[in-house]
Image (tube, rainbow, N blue to C red):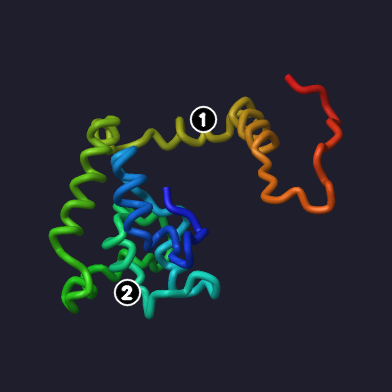
Amino acid sequence: MTAYMDLNGVPATGNHWLLAEVLRGTWGSAVSWSATPRRCTTCARTAFAADLADAGARALRAGVDMEMAVGDPAYAHLPEAVEAGRADEEALDACVRRVLTAKVRIGLLDQPYVDEDQAREVLADPAHRAAARQAAQRSAVLLRNEGGLLPLASRTPSP
């Protein structure tokens, strides 16, 4: 999954080497995290695309198979990028093929519809919420040990 960070000034979402060779070469597919192609036009630190069609085309060329986004994703603008010659239709077809292959492989298309009542019940399960809370508490990331913050004193006994 791509991220917001950049590597040597190139946003991960637009980095062909990182996505196509490293990520896809290792795991087989690359999916964007929270509209990262779109952010290539809006984020001051990683703004390197002229518009959403350009951002989608750059992410496609870099190897992002699918953009996970809500509300005006860059990939919605790929048809205009293809028409303008900024994106390759064969590359787009290859991305679609990889995404559909992954969905078939994990059985996502076997039962495409969900029992909505069961989904509400499962999503509201207190045990699932407790597990999610515990995972969030254990996944804190410290990027730098500024001001000698580490080691942290433990408030609760570790499991």
Query: In the image as oriented, which residue stretches furthest toward the top?
Result: 159
Residue at image coords 86%, 34%: 153
Mark 2, residues whose alpha carbon is within 10 Å: few (<14), some, or many (≥20)? many
Q: Which image quadrant is residue 135 in?
A: top right
Looking at the rendered image, the disc whose residue lies closer to the viewer, 1 or 2, is 2
Counting from the top left corner in percent of width and height, residue 157 is at 81, 22
Counting from the top left corner in percent of width and height, residue 69 is at 42, 58
Closer to the camera in the image, 136 or 115:
136
Residue at image coords 31%, 60%: 62
- Identified by mark 2, the residue type is Asp
Q: Which residue is mark 1?
A: 122
Counting from the top left corner in percent of width and height, residue 103 is at 27, 38
Q: Label 2: state its secondary structure.
A: helix
Residue 18 horizontal side relative to residue 92, left or right: right
Instruction: Tell me the number on the disc at residue 55.
Output: none
Query: In the image as oriented, which residue stretches furthest toward the front?
Result: 8
